[in-house]
Amino acid sequence: PLRSPLCKEMSDGCSFTELLPEVQEVLSPHFSLVDCCLGIGPDLSRPPFNRPFRNLGQKVTYVPDSKVIADDLDKSNQHEIRLSETSFVLTDSIEGQVIEIALEGGIDWITPITLLFHKIFASKWTFLVAEVENGKAFFHVLSSNGANSNRPKIESSEPKAGNFSLWIVPVSKIFAIPAPQKKVKIVKRVVKKKSPIEGTEGANDGVVRKIVRKKKVETNEDTVLTRKSNGTNGREEENEIKDIPKLNGNKREDSDMEIATRSEKSPQSPNGFSDTLKEMNGKKEKLSISLDSSSSYPILHSSLPTSNSSKTPSSIVNGRSENSSDEEDISTLRREIMERDKLRRIGEEAMRKDSITRRPNSRSPTSALDAILEGKAGMNRGATEGFPLPMGRSGTFISHPSVDLPPFCILSLPQPSEIPVAALQIILRSQFSFEEIASLRIIHPHWDEICGQILNGGYYSLLERTDRMLMKYQRRLHSDSALHYAVSVLTSIQVHILNPVDIMRAALDEGICCFPYGLIIDRCISMLDQIDQMVTTREKMDIGWEKVGILSKRASIHYRIHLENVIEERMGTCARLKAAQRIIRMDSMIVEHNVQKLEKESMRSRDDLKWELEQMQQSYASLKKENRQLKADQMKLESRVESLETKLRSICRLLS
């Protein structure tokens, strides 16, 4: 399996919080309502999920093909989420942070999220997504290679918009599908036996030596010549085995000239068989040396075939002349050795680059969002790094200490910025003096703020306690003359100690700075405790306030020399900001008043216009009525005129 922490590669580091606005921005054009936030995920034991576990988990393992890696699969303490017949997801069901997304009024969310992850992550990535749509639950695995889901495919003419609830969690481990093994192509050629006259000079031992010239091989394949005894006619065959990857991954060039010793079996050469055995033993030793050297390196790829690793080179070489399948075993063994050596070098290179780019002095490793490396280069890195803890638990991410942390780091101690504020305040107030608190302000800006608040609170409580004690003892002074010394000491404390440093009161009230002189607060509190003890026990005690008065004067001088200009400048800036805020408020009030005035005028003008329109409508109706009446009168007059004309015509006709 491939393991890798999810870290974002587009910048120095990015967390889930930084990923939320980008997800919301890419989904907004496709949905009417998009809501993104961080949460702990859904309760998978309740409907509509109905799973035997509760959470999506922190360590999520994706198995794309269970048939190929069934032997390497360990389901102990894991819960299975089935995606298809051959693919599923394993989770430890530990509660962690996930990205929660609520979508309304849209159709497709997979495409924009996939495009966003392709844009953000430079290399490969994989996420597990739990989806609820209209009361139905589905699980998806989105990766750089595509998406896998248990949603049934429904063929519909037109998709309908719906509401979705999504929970996204990164996948920490992937069982990569091993690449199919290349078939070794074996080409056999038979070398005809030649007479000794055509060869070179032979020795008396019956061995004929011949010079064989070969061309340089410039491809990625080696040509290995193996000889096989025919057994019937005493001839030997040379087998040319191609498509075998080179050892160490380098291009090897064969020498231009190789001297091949060919043994001929004959009754006259009894030493031929012994020479053949010597040659085979030499090859056996070479193979055993290469096996020993390769076995000293760690096997980084668990998907490499190991069925033939138990076969020794001696058994392969000795059985080579008996069965042709032994030659295939030899080629498979060589290919394993070459692949393992190549993977070892790739892993060493990846570790070297990772050690160079990693920060050596950082207590916290990189962020929680990185691409999942599924290739061979990510295997070694995945073996040395673990999946980080989710955000929100302790505020930090802890990786493998042997890789990411120096040996002297203590992982159990939190960083200064990670201690809760309430706990830090309780510890500082109960375990440290004000002088120590003043010196602890340099640790971290958060500590500076908290220590400053504690110092200001101590200073104000000191002033209140001094005033209360002085008023109390002054009221009792007429009845108890033994309080004269206590009243005089309290008066000296107020006049000679608290009054010189009271010039900082305005800055403290405005929140510009804190009271930095914690030693004065400690000494004054100690003197007030002595005064209370003296009044309670009625014992005369010598309280030396003079040294504290000198400290107060020195503090006043230090403030005037080093702090007064800066604080005055800050107070001026604060006053300018307050004035600007007042001006802005006044402007807003004026604008609001003008707006209200304009609204009233517009309403009045609108009412007037409405009244005028109503009057015009009424006049128009009356005019229409009058027009109808006039038309009726016109028609009556026209009819009378016609009748008079007919009468006149008839009279004229009678008179004529």
Image (cartoon, grey):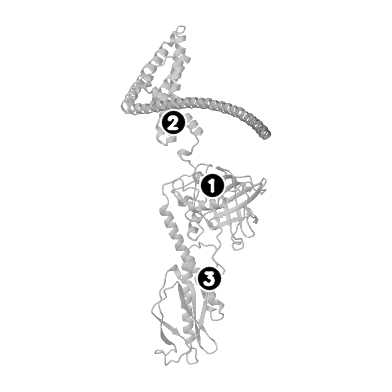
Indicate which disc residue 451 carries: 2
Q: CA distance from mark 1 to mark 3?
A: 47 Å
- The x, y position of residue 527, in whole percent, is 42, 20
Identify the mark nearer the N-term, 1 or 2: 1
Is residue 159 depicted above or below 197 in this figure? above
Which residue lies at the image location 64% right of the left edge and 59% below the top edge?
85
- The x, y position of residue 326, in whole percent, is 55, 77
Label 2 near label 3: C-beta < 8 Å? no
The residue pinned by badge 3 equals: 182
The residue pinned by badge 1 equals: 29
Q: Furthest residue to the front?
A: 656
Amino acid marked by disc 3 = Lys
- Mark 1, other Cα within 10 Å: few <14 / some 14–19 / many ≥20: few
- Mark 2, other Cα within 10 Å: few <14 / some 14–19 / many ≥20: many
Element class at badge 3: loop
Q: Furthest residue to the top?
A: 478
Is residue 364 depicted above or below 639 in this figure? below
Of the 4 image quadrants, the one containing the N terminus is bottom right
Q: Nearer the viewer, residue 305 or 412?
A: 305
- The x, y position of residue 604, in whole percent, is 53, 25
Element class at badge 1: helix
